[in-house]
Structure formats: structure tokens, C-alpha cells
């Protein structure tokens, strides 16, 4: 069972200066519509609590308030309004969870209400940020096939469109929330260097042999989205740095799957790298796969 990737539009720092990690805490309450599952709501509310904590401690680039409100129209119907920080709005980045506590969920006006409080270590980001573009493509390699919702069907082909304005190193990991396993999607399984380098200003399509350089074609892995239950929710980590780094110490356990390691070991590797590499930027996105 191996679900794959999704759309990303992200940013990472150039000549990034990151200060000493500190403890931050935040909380968030979310009123979920009927079409949002409990698992999806838990992922969303946790992400917003972390962003609120970062904004409270370090401030924001764009002044916005993270809030969720529910209004009754007087006819027995409620409307949900959500305003949240974007990942590029806050001037800090989350490094590691210390404590996560969910209140018992309840229903109000036929909507699931979920609240979470979280504490963790984070650091302030000081310096200019350089935009890069990464798009997850569904069943096609042109940008018109972009899946901006992160939703896929069992058996869908998946590709990654990527462009950076500066030379950088890139790694992509998929975390399976069911088996608590991290799969290394990029660099490719057969790449002995343990890193994928991208050139400034070049358009890439990863997970496609057709679009790979001739010397890279033999090692390109092409992926399909799969799931053992429906829907299935997972997380994709997109890791970029202008400094050279190697992938985690993962293992090749199955011929039909990418290299893997336990999720806990992946997070330890990632935390160590982020502490030592002030140029490293990490973006996480949720992925939904349905049969």
C-alpha cells in the first residue's frame, strides 16, 4: 500500500538566518463542514494551531488573523467562515512537537467542533525569501493536470512539476499515517548519491522517464496512487536547501516500494538537519486518496 504526492506551492529562504530554537504554544478551534472527516479536521486544526503559535511569537509577513467563525442566517442554516495564516505568512518555522492535546470533539449546529492546543520548538526566520514552484500533477505531465486539492483516486499516476530560481537540493518523502512509515520518493531508489540537485531556472517533471535526462532515465521511479482503505490521509514532506544534504538512512525492504524508514526516525533526521542547516526549508501537505 503506497499513496503518493500532491500539489505544492512553497517558499524557502535564500541566505536564511534562523535564530536559536525556542518553545512556542498555540491553540485553535475548527468547526468542520459535513464533508470533512474527523481525521482531516484533526490535521487541519493542528496545522492552524502551529501557525497561530508561530504568528504570536514571531509575527507575520502579511497581517492576518487566524480565526474560524460560524454564523446563522436566521433560517436554520449556518455558514462557516475561515481565515487562516498561510505557511509563507509567518516569520518562523516549526521544528518539533513537544505536546499535542485535543479536546473531546462535539457537534454544534450539525457541525463538528474540534479544538487543539500544541507546544513545540520553533525558530525565527530572518532574511529574504525566494519563491519556488512545485505542482503535483494527476494523470498527465503538463501543468494543466495540476491537482490543487490534493485529492487522488486509487490507480492515478502522479508527477511533480518543479522550478527553482536558484540552484538547490531537493528531497521528497511520503509519510504513511497507517503504517507510520516514511517513504523516500526523491532522490530515486537507484540514485547512489542520496540527493537530487536542481538547477536554477529549469523546469523539471519528476517521476517521469519521458522527461528525465538520458543518463537519469534508468533510475527514474514512476508512481501510482494506491490505498488500502478509502479515504486514506497521508502527509508529503518537501525538503529544499541551497546547502548540500543527503537523504535519511532509509532501507530497501521491498522491490515494489521506495526506500523506507520508521516515521519517528525520519522526524529525528529532519530535526537534526534543520538545526544544522539554516538554509533548509520544509513544507508539509496533506494528501487524500479514494477508491
Image (cartoon, rainbow, N blue to C red):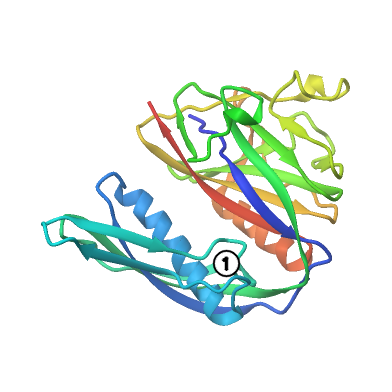
Q: In this view, does 231 lie above or below 286?
A: above
Q: Which of 131 and 233 is in front in this view?
A: 131
Q: Quadrant of residue 254?
A: top right
- Of the pair 102 and 208, the residue shown nearer to us: 208
- Above or below, 76 against 178 in this view is below
**Residue sitting farthest toward the left:** 75
Q: Which residue is drawn at 11% across and 57% down?
A: 76
Q: In which quarter of the image is the C terminus?
A: top left
127 is higher (above) or lower (below) than 187: below
Q: How many marks?
A: 1
Q: Is 178 left, or right, of 169 in this rendering?
A: left
Is 177 located above or below residue 210 in the figure? Answer: below
| Rendered residue at 85%/56% (across/down) | 243
Furthest toward the front, the residue is 74
Quick check: can you spot residue 263?
Answer: yes
Determine the image quadrant of residue 191.
top right
Picture quadrant of residue 213:
top right
Residue 275 placement, left or right of 89: right
For label 1, the residue is 96
Q: Residues within 10 Å of mark 1 (few under 14, many from 20)?
A: some
Horizontally, is 116 left or right of 190 in the view?
A: left
Q: Residue at position x 75%, y 18% from top? A: 210
Q: Measured from the top left, where is residue 91 in percent x and y?
A: 64, 72
Residue 248 in view in this figure: no
Image location (x, y in percent) of residue 262: 56, 47
Q: Nearer the viewer, residue 179 or 56?
A: 56
What residue is drawn where x is 57% and y is 81%? Answer: 57
Instruction: Tell me the element at label 1.
Output: strand
Amino acid at each position: 500500500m503506497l499513496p503518493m504526492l500532491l500539489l505544492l506551492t512553497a517558499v524557502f529562504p535564500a541566505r536564511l538566518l534562523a535564530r536559536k530554537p525556542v518553545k512556542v504554544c498555540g491553540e485553535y478551534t475548527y468547526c468542520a463542514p459535513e464533508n470533512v472527516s474527523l481525521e482531516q479536521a484533526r490535521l487541519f486544526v493542528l496545522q492552524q494551531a502551529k501557525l497561530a503559535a508561530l504568528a504570536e511569537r514571531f509575527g507575520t509577513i502579511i497581517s492576518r488573523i487566524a480565526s474560524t467563525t460560524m454564523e446563522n442566517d436566521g433560517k436554520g442554516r449556518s455558514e462557516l467562515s475561515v481565515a487562516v495564516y498561510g505557511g509563507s505568512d509567518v516569520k518562523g518555522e516549526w521544528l518539533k512537537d513537544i505536546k499535542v492535546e485535543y479536546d473531546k470533539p462535539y457537534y454544534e449546529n450539525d457541525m463538528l467542533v474540534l479544538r487543539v492546543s500544541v507546544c513545540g520548538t520553533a525558530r525565527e526566520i530572518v532574511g529574504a525569501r525566494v519563491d519556488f514552484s512545485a505542482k503535483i500533477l494527476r494523470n498527465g505531465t503538463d501543468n494543466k493536470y495540476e491537482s490543487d486539492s490534493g485529492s487522488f483516486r486509487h490507480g492515478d499516476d502522479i508527477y511533480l512539476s518543479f522550478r527553482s530560481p536558484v540552484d538547490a537540493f531537493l528531497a521528497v518523502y511520503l509519510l504513511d499515517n497507517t503504517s507510520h512509515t516514511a517513504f523516500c520518493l526523491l532522490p530515486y531508489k537507484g540514485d547512489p548519491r542520496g540527493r537530487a540537485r536542481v538547477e536554477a531556472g529549469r523546469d523539471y517533471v519528476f517521476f517521469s522517464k519521458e522527461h528525465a535526462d538520458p543518463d537519469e532515465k534508468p533510475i527514474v521511479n514512476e508512481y501510482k496512487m494506491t490505498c488500502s482503505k478509502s479515504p486514506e490521509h497521508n502527509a508529503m514532506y518537501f525538503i529544499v536547501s541551497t546547502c548540500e544534504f543527503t537523504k535519511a538512512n532509509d532501507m530497501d525492504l521491498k522491490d515494489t516500494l521506495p526506500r523506507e524508514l520508521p516515521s519517528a526516525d525520519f522526524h529525528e533526521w529532519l530535526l537534526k538537519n534543520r538545526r544544522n542547516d539554516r538554509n533548509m526549508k520544509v513544507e508539509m501537505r496533506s494528501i487524500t486518496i479514494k477508491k
